[in-house]
Image: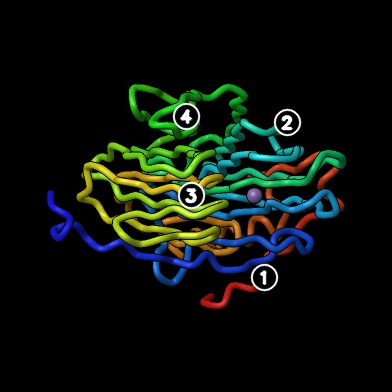
Amino acid sequence: MSTQELPPIDKIIAREAILGEGLAIRRALPTKERRMVGAWCFLDHLGPVGPEHSLSVGAHPHTCLQTFTWMIQGEVLHRDSLGYEQVIRPGQVNLMTAGRGISHTEDSLPGGDGMHTVQLWIALPEEQANMAPAFDHYPDLPIWLQDGVDMTLLVGEFAGHTAPTKVHSPLIAVDLQSKQAQTSSLALKPDFEYGILVLQGQLSVEGQSFVANEFAYFAPGRAELDLTWEAGTHVILIGGAPAKPVTMWWNFVDYDKSSIVQSQLDWENHSERFGSVVEGEHRRLAAPAIPWK
Ligand code: MN
C-alpha cells in the first residue's frame, strides 16, 4: 500500500487525571477522540516520578475487564478479594481478570528511585463478561533486540515470539526502547488497529513526530510502520482487532448501562460479588453518583 492510500494518523494528547490519593497521571484511553484500540479500553501512564511520590489506591471493584499493569520502575503491592498478594517489579506484568466481580488495592512500596508504570484495561468479550475472576503474575516475558530496538512482548504474538499473558481477544502489546537515534520498521497486521504512546523521548512516524504523552492512533490497513527514533526514546505499542464498544463508568466496564447501575448498587451494598480485600476495607473507595441514572 502506498503512503497516500494509508488512513491518516490521529495524534491524541493524553489528558491529565488524578489517580488514587492525589497522584497525577496521563490518560491516553479513553479520550473524546478515541474510546478503544481493539479491546484495550483504558491506558494510564504514571511517571516517571521520584521517590517522594507514592501510589495508594484503596479497595475498589471492577467488572467485565482485565486490569493489565506493566512495571517499568518501582514496586507496587497488589492485594485482591481472591486473596492474592503480589508485588510487581520492573519488567513484570500483573493481569487481574474481573469477570463478574473482584475488588483490589494497589500500594507502592517505599524505597527505590521512584515509579514509572503503565496500566491498561482490556474489555472482556460480551460472552465472557461474567466469567470467574482470576489473577495472574508474569515475571518473565519475551525480550529481544530487533533493528537496534529493545523489545519486550507483553501480550500476543509478534516477530516470532509469543507472550504467556492470558487474554480473551486478538490483542498485542509491546514495550519498545531505542538507546540510539535510528530508524526501524515494524510488521503490522492489516486487520488490527494500533496505538503508540510515547513514554519518554520522541518518535516520528510517516512525517509526524510524537513526544511523551502523545498517542498515535492507526486505523486498520497498515502492514508495516517505519519509525524514526531519537536517542533514549521509550514507547508502548498496543493493537487489536476492532472490538464491540463498551460502556464505562468509574471502575466498571459493561455492555449496557443497567448492568453498570446494578454493579454500583452491589458495591454500595457490600455484595459478596466483590468480596473484600484483607487490610483494604478500612479504605474502601466510594463510587460517585451515576449521572445518567
Ligand atoms: Mn483497579
Which is nearer the N-term, disc 2 or disc 3?
2
The residue labelled by disc 1 is: 288
Which mark is on residue 86?
Answer: 2
Residue at point 74% right, 40% down? 74
Secondary structure state at the residue bearing disc 2: strand
Residue at point 41% right, 42% down? 182
Which mark is on residue 230?
Answer: 3
Residue at mark 4 to residue at mark 1: CA–CA distance: 32 Å
Which is nearer the N-term, disc 2 or disc 1?
2
Residue 72: image x %, image y %? 64, 39
**Dot 4 and dot 1 residues touching (CB under 8 Å):** no
Amino acid marked by disc 4: Lys
The residue labelled by disc 4 is: 166
Amino acid marked by disc 2: Gln
Asked if the beta carbon under badge 3 is closer than 8 A to the nearest atom of ligand 1, the reply is: no
Secondary structure state at the residue bearing disc 1: loop
Residue at mark 3 to residue at mark 1: CA–CA distance: 42 Å
Residue at point 64% right, 73% down? 289
Amino acid marked by disc 3: Glu
State the residue in front, 100 or 186: 186
Asked if the beta carbon under badge 4 is closer than 8 A to the nearest atom of ligand 1, the reply is: no
In front: mark 4 or mark 1? Answer: 4
Secondary structure state at the residue bearing disc 4: loop
Residue 5: image x %, image y %? 13, 58
